[in-house]
Amino acid sequence: MKVSRAWLQTYFEEELPTAQELADLFTFHSFEVEGVEEVDGDWIIDLDVLPNRSSDCLSHRGVARELATLLSRPMKREPLRSPLASVEAPSNFTVTVDDPKLCRRYMGAVVRGVCVKESPKWLQRSLERIGQRSINNIVDATNYVMFDLGQPLHAFDLAKLMRTPEGATGIGVRLARPGEQIAVLTGETYELSARDLIITDSVAEKPLAIAGIKGGARAEISTDTVDIIIEAANFDYTSVRKTSQSLRLATDASLRFQNEPAPELPAFAMRDVIKLLEEIAGGRTMGVYDAYMPLGERMPVDVTLSHINKLLGVSMTIDDVERILVRFEWEFSLDGEEFAITPPWERSDLRIPEDIIEEIGRVYGLRSIPSILPPIPSDPPKVTLSQYCGDLIRHTLTDLGYTEVLTYTLRDKGEVELLNPLASDKAFMRMDLRSGILEALEMNVANAPILGLSDLRVFEVGTRFTARGEELALAIGVRGITTKQAKMEAALAEDIRLLSTALGVELQMKIVDGVAECSLIPALAELPTPTAYREPLPWDGSVRYAPWSPYPYVLRDIAVWVPADTPATEVLEVITAHAGDLLVRSDLFDTYTKEDKTSYAWHLVFQSPERTLNDVEVNECMDAVTAKLHTRQGWSVR
């Protein structure tokens, strides 16, 4: 969310720190900061507000409350603590909510005699600085209050609602009928399902808006509008999220509703938007209809000092915790070392002791928490049979020249289907390891030249998921590149025999297309209980790793005639010295001697870590190498 420093300043008497200082404060205590920029004489801070704080901090008031706590200074104004005046329902207007669980509160205010026009310059600038487009004074007022308090609002043209013969109008909140359609303000038409919550003209039974997401064109505010209905509601966050995802329609309103704002918030937003509209649009409020299902009394969260210190790894005192709770301005009582803390109603994310402790910890300061190594047990950890078996397999196969791979667990088909898949091709848990091994082999065949491999040998020890349940399995795969596949599969059969010997259990593995797979359950049943954990393979410290280039390589061959007594290493030194940094690999693949001459042939692999190479660049490298080779007495490129 983009917040304005000037907007935040309206909440404080004392001058706030600079925008960069505020950004540093947020970074170390509250939110990630995406950027800080100057816009039209104001400083805008782009905050990445995570879901656990989205119920209160997708608003300038919420961020101001955060600053008041972190800076330990009072707020000049606190709109959510100001008293609310009692209001009466308007005549000839009602609100009907079919399911209060989907709409815990719906407030509808009837305002007559407004003048729709351009917003005042201060309002236009306030919205435009945070990236919002000014529309008209009615819409801008609802947007301003949303970005100020975090409560989405909407305005309907009252004249566009149907009336009963007695002159009554009303708003309805219900689930859509299958196939029902709505044209929204931006011109698109959406077909709704029976799980989508909508706002309707209760007399005409026609959709006016997609609840919590987008207003409809049917009751759009225009320059001819005189009488309006202002909506301030609290919709079920799960319902809003599902509808937003199914329609692929995300808005500032849906972002806030799907993060569970408090049902008390609409009343404060309604108060502020009515006041603002009276100032910039005129009109008279005829009353506010409030359909509300209270959640019940807020219950305190109990947390002890010892629990706080143990979870954070600190040594705070009772006084330390009390000072932080006072900065939050939370209600609390103390009994011995146990705090009974009642979070404010707008903080719907604070429900369990760990939530409270997290808040205490970040205000205390993460940099104030000492770094302590975890205790090291005197006895080695116990090893399970499956760990022992997997470790023994890994050691044996790596000693035989195999490389372990880890392939995707989610697949496009299987016996165990996910309820909420990440993608259509990842809707099932894998029922075998074979598919992943085949993909790994195919992928690395294409990369064999840069790896300098004559064959591929891979394996995986992992879990597969069937209708019978989960089971540990082993899959081994081979693929010949310069070696014939039949020879590779014969070697695989021999390696399976050696592995069976190492395990002391006969592995029943059938080789199909170079891949063998079996369940390890029978092997686990026959293995003795391990008494010691085998040490991992030693590392001498000489191995170095570099990032894998994402760009394609270029393969070239070169053959050189040299005097028979010239070693291949001498020729290769000349090639590598003049081929440049783009040469990443060279493999001698042929040596041929005829009379007093010897021919050496190399595969040369060129690749850049920064870009895709073109023929011109590689040709320049090859020309430089060829020119240098021809300067040597008795040397020539074939």
Image (spheres, rainbow, N blue to C red):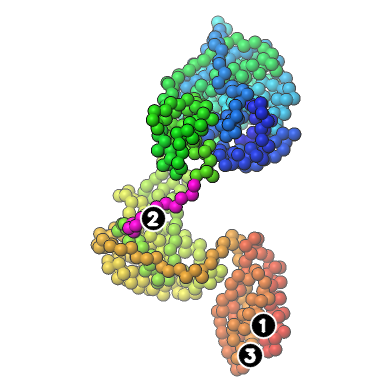
The residue under the point 51% across, 31% down is 323
Is 167 covered by the magenta stretch?
Answer: no
For this orientation, the residue located farthest to the bottom is 595
In this figure, which residue is indicated by the disc labeled 2? Answer: 376
Q: Element at badge 1? A: strand
Q: Residue 398 placed where, x, y %? A: 41, 68
In this figure, which residue is indicated by the disc labeled 1? Answer: 637
Q: Element at badge 2? A: loop
Disc marking residue 563: 3
Q: Residue 263 placed where, x, y %? A: 50, 23
What is the C-alpha distance between the residues marked 3 and 2? 64 Å
Q: Element at badge 3? A: strand
Name the one closer to the observer, 5 or 455.
Answer: 5
Q: Residue 405 placed where, x, y %? A: 44, 61
| Residue 168 seen from this side | no
* Disc 1 versus disc 3: nearer the observer: 3
What is the C-alpha distance between the residues marked 2 and 1? 63 Å
Dot placed on the residue nearer the N-terminal end, 1 or 3: 3
Is 375 covered by the magenta stretch?
Answer: yes
What range is drawn magenta here? Answer: 370-381
The residue under the point 72% across, 38% down is 38
Rendered view: 469 above or below 280: below
